[in-house]
Amino acid sequence: MTTDTLSPRTTPTPPTPPSSRPSTSPWRDGVRRTRALSGANVRLMRRNRLTTLYAFVVPLTPLVLIAFADGSTAAAAAGAGSVLLLALVFPVYYTVLSMLVTRRDELVLKRLRTGEVRDREVVASLALPGTVVAAVVMAVAVAIGLPTGLPFPTNLPLYVVTVLAGAGMFTAFALWTASFTRTAENAQITSMPVILLASAGTLAPSLPDRAAEVLSWTPMAALDTLQRVAWFGLDTDGGSVGFAGSWAEAGQPLVVLAVWSVLAVDLARRTMRWEPRS
């Protein structure tokens, strides 16, 4: 009688069921990281009283000019230009400059770049808080103007493009200015050339034709013209235009804005520093 040798029976491993949790895309991961960094930057802004004043209080002061315009389109357009100037210069330009220099000196930017965070996410997180503040301020300006008899924006898409494009351009200028700003305290001095250039642009409508023509090629003059056309339907001669006509009037200032934006981005890319000089 022979004894059969039984071979050990192997139990097949059941296939692993697919995970019910959807895999996140790189784009969603980037958005999540940008939001987290933006929140950290907002907390940094709130700890610095001067930055908080510039970002949240100063842009609101010219709204008084719109509130007391008494339906005068010319006065309201001038007031709206001042609102746009302060909303872009302080919440966007100066705040990005100050935060970037502070983060760089603390080696935060250097540490972020060693992880998963992309450079564009760092820049976006710096620009996002100020851009949101600028957009809210310009929306509040319209809301304040409506009860006083001012019109709803003639070209709302162009109005939005004006604010966002201006925020992008001033962010690039902030990155460039940071390259020769050693400390956050020095930003009050190094930011003056850009602030003066921006301020000069808003004077164009009140100057003689020759001077106004020269200033019309400055970035803030282009933005001021765009907000006048987009909100009030005013052309460069003070006449009225409709929705279709506003696009034609916006051609030259949009080109000027695009040229300055390309210049600002190029300067920022060539001079951007992520850590302090040794």
Image (cartoon, rainbow, N blue to C red):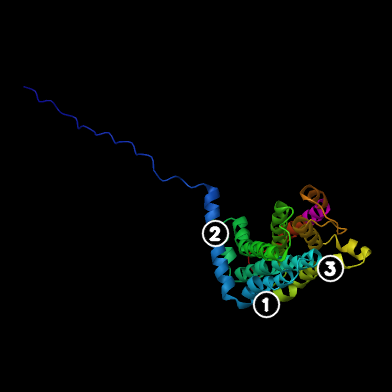
Give the x, y percent position of residue 69.
76, 69
| Residue 133 found in image quarter | bottom right
Q: 92 above or below 258?
A: below
**Mark 3, residues whose alpha carbon is within 10 Å: few (<14), some, or many (≥20)?**
some
Left-right relation of 21 to 54:
left
Mark 3 element type: loop
* Residue type at numbered disc 2: Arg
Query: In the rendered image, is residue 72 in sight?
Result: yes
Of badges 2 and 1, nearer the viewer stands 2
Residue wearing tag 1 = 185
- Residue mark closest to the camera, 3 vs 1: 3
Residue 215, image x, y percentages: 86, 63
Q: Which amino acid type is shown beneath numbered disc 3?
A: Leu
Q: Quadrant of residue 264?
A: bottom right
- The residues colored magenta run 250-259
Mark seen at residue 203? 3
Can residue 272 be seen here? The reply is no
- The amino acid beneath tag 1 is Glu
